[in-house]
Image: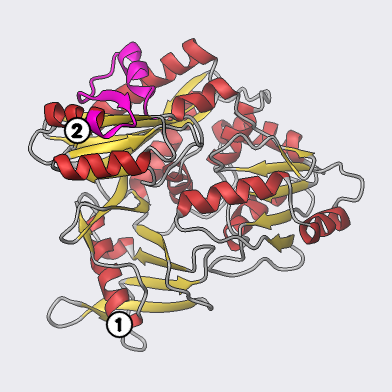
């Protein structure tokens, strides 16, 4: 089902959108936070709320359709990286000290330096873009909570059940001893601290088993980390639940499946985005939402938090067990926004909440609106960066053949999903978007995503590598 088309907003949504319009009307914006084509939707949002034609400063061009001249000016930075986190870190460095050609392009757009910078998903504390102050900069105390070696203590203060863990020096002997005591039969997950910067998307995590593997991983992590968190590998569904602290309280939304794949015959973890096709049992859903509400209370109490946050974890047979907290906009929130439609800008609400804008909408009304829309409209899409270079964007419609296997769709046939290949800062980009109308809500999407990636490798040379759902 496609997201609802934009229409006259309800009174509840007007209470959220009107303050955004007051903040944005006539404002020149430098939009950041992804490749150029990935910023086009945000450009259209801010224009609809009265902003001037923006400037997009992307980490490369990306895969998709570039903005029209009347929609935005743009410049793509030349960035390469081995994984998502490496790309983001280099990008965020260049945002604050861009190369001369980017500075020249920005100065042509904003010669009097009156523009503001705006980005939805940034990992670090980027305070400005080439001297233009950034909206929604997080205080350091908020950023510190994204460190995986400190968050378990926060969960304990918030009264949230969690799996056992140990925080140890990045030392092979200490890691091996902790792993030996915590391994419940499926190995352990080692997570590096954030002493060299926040990491996400599965980077900085290793699933290992056996004394030799643990020692080897700890020794390698010691090059970039001072401490490690050791936790049992949790069997279940990787997932997250999002909340937004703004207006008169906290809105908590539906759970999102984290598309975490594993290498076939290996214990490598491969993050491939988020989807909302999956429905956990009703009691588990409410338990997750209750945990997120407790997180919101503790965040506001401890550090005066505002804006959105992501509580990630695994839904196990024993219940939901959190693994990390992202005190910022996460990819899952943007997945929920995609399901809601263009008239409900959750990302912008979060940015301006962080910035202290006078948002006085009803959190309860926002929660009800988002829950209703995202339960009706599902998002079933996966994406990944790959080392294989794909120079041009191509689309390939898929359908099931007579044997039930994925195949290229026949001309004129109804597509069951689309594979997209194109360029990225790592080399290539591979995405699969299923047609939700062909899929019943409820089951996990990760197995179908892994099947589509395998097809993309086999038929199109995509370069994802052999993966399967955890």
- Evaluate whether residue 280 shows in this view: no
Asked if the magenta segment contains residue 155, the reply would be: yes
Instruction: Left or right? Give the position of 270 relative to 144.
Output: left
Residue drawn at x 41%, y 67% is 430
Q: Which residue is mark 2?
A: 176
Q: Is 364 placed above or below 118 here?
A: above
Q: Residue furthest right?
A: 112
Please give the count of numbered marks on the rendered protein. 2
Residue 459 is marked as 1
Quarter location, residue 181 = top left
Residue 201 is marked as none
Instruction: Left or right? Give the position of 271 relative to 357.
Output: left
Segment tinted magenta in the rendering: 148-173
Instruction: Left or right? Give the position of 406 relative to 199.
Output: left
Quarter location, residue 227 = top left
Q: Is 462 placed above or below 215 here?
A: below
Residue drawn at x 51%, y 58% is 81
Residue drawn at x 80%, y 41% is 131
SS label for mark 2: helix
Viewer-side residue, 263 vs 406 = 263
């Amino acid at each position: 089902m496609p997201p609802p088309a934009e229409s006259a907003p309800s009174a509840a949504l007007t209470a959220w959108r009107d303050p955004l319009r007051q903040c944005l009307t006539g404002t020149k914006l430098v939009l950041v936070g992804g490749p150029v084509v990935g910023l086009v939707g945000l450009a259209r949002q801010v224009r609809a709320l009265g902003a001037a034609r923006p400037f997009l400063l992307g980490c490369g061009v990306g895969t998709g359709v570039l903005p029209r001249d009347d929609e935005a000016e743009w410049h793509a930075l030349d960035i390469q990286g081995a994984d998502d986190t490496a790309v983001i870190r280099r990008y965020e460095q260049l945002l604050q000290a861009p190369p001369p050609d980017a500075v020249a392009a920005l100065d042509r757009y904003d010669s009097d330096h009156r523009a503001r910078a705006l980005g939805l998903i940034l990992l670090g504390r980027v305070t400005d873009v080439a001297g233009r102050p950034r909206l929604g900069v997080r205080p350091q105390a908020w950023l510190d909570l994204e460190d995986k070696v400190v968050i378990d203590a926060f969960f304990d203060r918030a009264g949230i059940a969690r799996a056992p863990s140990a925080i140890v020096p990045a030392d092979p002997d200490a890691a091996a001893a902790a792993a030996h005591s915590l391994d419940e039969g499926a190995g352990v997950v080692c997570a590096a601290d954030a002493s060299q910067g926040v990491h996400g998307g599965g980077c900085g995590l290793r699933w290992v088993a056996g004394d030799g593997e643990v020692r080897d991983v700890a020794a390698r992590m010691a090059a970039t980390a001072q401490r490690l968190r050791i936790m049992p590998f949790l069997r279940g569904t990787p997932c997250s639940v999002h909340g937004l602290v703004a207006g008169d309280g906290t809105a908590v939304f539906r759970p999102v499946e984290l598309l975490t794949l594993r290498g076939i015959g290996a214990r490598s973890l491969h993050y491939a985005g988020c989807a909302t096709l999956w429905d956990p049992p009703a009691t588990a859903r409410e338990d997750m939402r209750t945990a997120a509400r407790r997180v919101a209370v503790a965040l506001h109490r401890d550090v005066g938090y505002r804006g959105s946050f992501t509580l990630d974890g695994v839904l196990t047979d024993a219940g939901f067990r959190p693994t990390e907290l992202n005190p910022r906009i996460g990819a899952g929130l943007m997945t929920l926004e995609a399901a809601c439609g263009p008239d409900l800008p959750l990302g912008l609400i979060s940015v301006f909440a962080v910035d202290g804008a006078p948002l006085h909408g009803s959190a309860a009304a926002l929660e009800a609106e988002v829950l209703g829309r995202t339960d009706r409209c599902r998002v079933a899409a996966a994406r990944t960066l790959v080392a294989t270079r794909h120079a041009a964007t191509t689309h390939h419609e898929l359908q099931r053949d007579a044997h039930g296997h994925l195949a290229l769709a026949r001309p004129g046939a109804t597509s069951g999903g689309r594979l997209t290949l194109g360029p990225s800062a790592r080399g290539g980009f591979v995405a699969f978007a299923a047609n939700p109308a062909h899929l019943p809500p409820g089951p996990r999407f990760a197995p179908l995503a892994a099947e589509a990636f395998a097809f993309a490798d086999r038929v199109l040379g995509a370069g994802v590598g052999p993966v399967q759902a955890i």
